[in-house]
Amino acid sequence: MPTPVSDAGPGEHPSAPAPALAFFDVDNTLLRGASVYHLGRIAWRRGHLGWRDLSRFAWQQARFTSVGENHQHQLAVRDRALELIAGHSVAELEEIAVEAYDVYLSRLLLPAVVARAHEHRAQGHEVWLITATPEACARVIAERLGLSGAIGTRIESVDGVFTGALLGPVMHGGHKADAAALLAGDRGVQLADCWAYSDSRNDIPLLELVGHQQVVNPDAALARYAQARGWPVMHDRPAASRRLSRE
């Protein structure tokens, strides 16, 4: 039985839903900008990051906010972040994630998108963040917003200390679709009854996977793709910042 929620929005049908999952990207979907930059700001304040590294993260944040994701830049930031985190404890990252949320990320949340997540929860759906952001940070956001959980990039640790190696792939592109399909299978949920929210062309595999697609603040390629397929598009950020990315 399909979920009674339509593409017009999850709050429009009060009848009891079939089991469903809603997957929300984080950066430039649930919140404005790149969350890893704000983790870097807190790390810098705590003396874990140098000024050059913070400047690099700042440049990445500015570019990401204005023109969307660039895979090569994302890989460069990831590699440097892994290098920097090696030797630090899991507890330290969790503390940084909490402080980053309280100081910065909570102010960058996009109200209409957060409202959608809460509408899904009110309908009895599980709501999962799915993001390339480190899972420790994504979990904090999910917990603070009262969501079901988070799937993020996992970093290997030994005896509570990070090695600087990844544990599995970066949660990006097709890996998001794989993780979403695995969770839906574990929950016994039909993918046709699931939702996905994203701003990026890199998440097209995830969007194509589910029965209900919602494009949010899309980059140029995703905007065209959504228009061609009749997917709904929502905007939730100041008009001045709605710049579509160049390919």
Image (tube, rainbow, N blue to C red):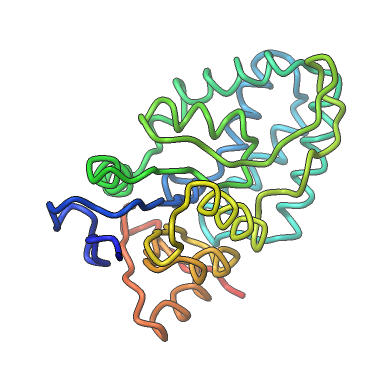
> Residue at image x 48%, y 47%?
187
Please identify the quarter of the rendering in which residue 245 is found: bottom right
Look at the image and tell me in which quarter the C terminus lies: bottom right
Q: Is residue 159 left or right of residue 195?
A: right
Q: Is residue 178 left or right of residue 33?
A: right
Direction bottom: furthest residue: 228
Q: Quadrant of residue 82?
A: top right
Residue 103, given in percent of the width and then of the height, sits at 46, 21
Rendering coords of residue 148 (x, y %) = 42, 35
Which residue shows up at 64% across the image and 61% down it?
A: 173
Near-viewer residue (133 or 81): 133
Q: Relative to residue 80, is residue 228 drawn left or right?
A: left
Residue 75 appears at what percent x and percent y? 77, 52
Badge count: 0
Q: Quadrant of residue 10?
A: bottom left
For this rendering, which residue is in front, 160 or 79?
A: 160
Left or right placement of residue 144 versus residue 163 in this view: left
Closer to the camera in the image, 180 or 104: 180
Point out the image quarter for the N terminus: bottom left
Q: Which residue is found at the position 71% from the left and 52% from the top?
A: 74
The residue located at (82%, 43%) in the rendering is: 79
Please determine whether, in this image, residue 56 is positioned above or below residue 180.
above
- Residue 55, percent from left and from top: 70, 36
Choose between 132 and 46: the one closer to the eye. 132
